[in-house]
Image: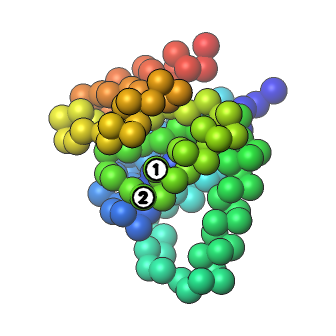
C-alpha cells in the first residue's frame, strides 16, 4: 500500500526554500502519493485571495490532513500556516516529521518542546533524504 503524505512548507510566509520543497516532494513520491505536491511549485499565488477562496484552501488542506498517513514539514522558513497544520495533524494523531536547517534557523519551543513531534535538524540536503529513507523503513 502506498502511503499518503501531507507535505507542509511555507507559502505566504516566504518561498526561499521552494526548490528544496520540490526535491523533497519528488523524493517522497517514490514511496507514495504527496497530496500537497503544489507546495513545491514556483508559481503559487502568494496573496490573500479573499475570505471565500481562503476558506476553500482551508477546507481542502484540512481534508488532506485527515486523509494522509504521515505529515512531513520543512520548517526552516517560519510559517504560521505550517504551525497550524502541525497542530491540526497532532490533534488527528498523524505522525509528524519536522525538518529544519539548523545552520539557518531555530525552531519554536512549541515544536521542539512537544514530544509528539519527530524533529530532524539537518545541515545538508543529503541528510534530509537519508532521514526520509529511514522513516520509510
Q: Residue at x 65, y 58 (%)?
A: 61
Q: Residue at x 32, y 28 (%)?
A: 121
Q: Residue at x 30, y 57 (%)?
A: 16
Q: Position of residue 81 (x, y in %)?
A: 48, 58
Residue 110's label in the rendered image is none
Q: Quadrant of the N terminus?
A: top right
Measured along the vertical axis of the image, is residue 37 above or below residue 109? Answer: below
Residue designated by label 2: 80
Q: Position of residue 43 (x, y in %)?
A: 46, 70
Q: Quadrant of the C terminus?
A: top right
Measured along the vertical axis of the image, is residue 78 above or below residue 50? Answer: above
Q: Position of residue 80 (x, y in %)?
A: 42, 58
Residue furthest right in the image: 1
Q: Residue at x 24, y 39 (%)?
A: 106
- Disc tally is 2
- Which of these two is toward me, 115 or 67? 115
Q: Position of residue 134 (x, y in %)?
A: 52, 16
Q: Are marks 1 and 2 in contact (CB under 8 Å)?
A: yes
- Which of these two is toward me, 97 or 5? 97
Q: Is residue 34 left or right of residue 14?
A: right
Local packing at callout 2 (Cα closer than 10 Å; few below 14, some 14-19, many 20+) is: few
Answer yes or no: is residue 29 visible: no
- Which of these two is toward me, 112 or 59? 112
Residue 83's label in the rendered image is 1
Badge 1 marks a residue whose secondary structure is helix
Amino acid at each position: 500500500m502506498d502511503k499518503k503524505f501531507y507535505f507542509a512548507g511555507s507559502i505566504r510566509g516566504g518561498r526561499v526554500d521552494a526548490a528544496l520543497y520540490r526535491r523533497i516532494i519528488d523524493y517522497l513520491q517514490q514511496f507514495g502519493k504527496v497530496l500537497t505536491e503544489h507546495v513545491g511549485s514556483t508559481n503559487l499565488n502568494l496573496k490573500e485571495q479573499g475570505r471565500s477562496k481562503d476558506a476553500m484552501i482551508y477546507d481542502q488542506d484540512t481534508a488532506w490532513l485527515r486523509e494522509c498517513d504521515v505529515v512531513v514539514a520543512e520548517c526552516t522558513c517560519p510559517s504560521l500556516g505550517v504551525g497550524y497544520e502541525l497542530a491540526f495533524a497532532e490533534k488527528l494523531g498523524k505522525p509528524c516529521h519536522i525538518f529544519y536547517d539548523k545552520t539557518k534557523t531555530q525552531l519554536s519551543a512549541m515544536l521542539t518542546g512537544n514530544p509528539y513531534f519527530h524533529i530532524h535538524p539537518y545541515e545538508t540536503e543529503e541528510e534530509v533524504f537519508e532521514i526520509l529513507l529511514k522513516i520509510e523503513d
